[in-house]
Amino acid sequence: MKNLYELLKPEIKKALKANAKKYSTAQRLSYKLMANNIWSDLHIQDVSDLCSYSDLYTYQLTAHDIMYGSKFLNDE
């Protein structure tokens, strides 16, 4: 089973990797995504941080995106 980091869309993963080099909190978020397999294990703050470090704005998200990660994850 793939972890959440592996399931990220390429553009999200690329932005997160770039920000992880600059910010320790982005690096910590990467590790948290690697440690979890289920989107619902994340906290709302994790989703908010993922928006920040992947150059998305929370107003661009729907409730479905937040609950199920559809804006962030590949359809696998």
Image (cartoon, rainbow, N blue to C red):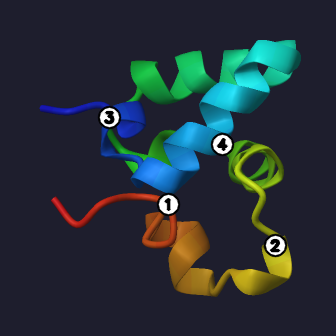
Q: Earlier in the sequence, mark 2 or mark 1?
A: 2
Percent coordinates x, y for residue 55 in the rendering: 78, 57
SS label for mark 2 = helix
Give me the disc on residue 72.
Answer: 1
The residue that label 4 is drawn on is 15
The residue that label 3 is drawn on is 6
Percent coordinates x, y for residue 45 in the rendering: 80, 46
Q: Earlier in the sequence, mark 3 or mark 1?
A: 3
The residue that label 2 is drawn on is 58
| In this rendering, the label closer to the viewer, 4 or 1 | 4
Badge 1: how crowded within 10 Å, few (<14), some, or many (20+)? many
Q: Quadrant of the N terminus?
A: top left
Q: Earlier in the sequence, mark 4 or mark 2?
A: 4
Cα separation between marks 2 and 1: 12 Å
| In this rendering, the label closer to the viewer, 4 or 2 | 4
Cα separation between marks 3 and 4: 14 Å
- Indicate the amino acid at tag 1: Phe
Percent coordinates x, y for residue 75 in the rendering: 23, 66
- Indicate the amino acid at tag 4: Ala
Above or below, 13 against 72 in this view is: above
- Indicate the amino acid at tag 3: Glu
Q: Quadrant of the C terminus?
A: bottom left
Q: Earlier in the sequence, mark 3 or mark 4?
A: 3
SS label for mark 1 = loop
The residue closer to the viewer here, 71 or 42, is 71
Cα separation between marks 3 and 1: 11 Å
Cα separation between marks 4 and 1: 12 Å
Q: Evaluate whether residue 5 shows in this view.
A: yes
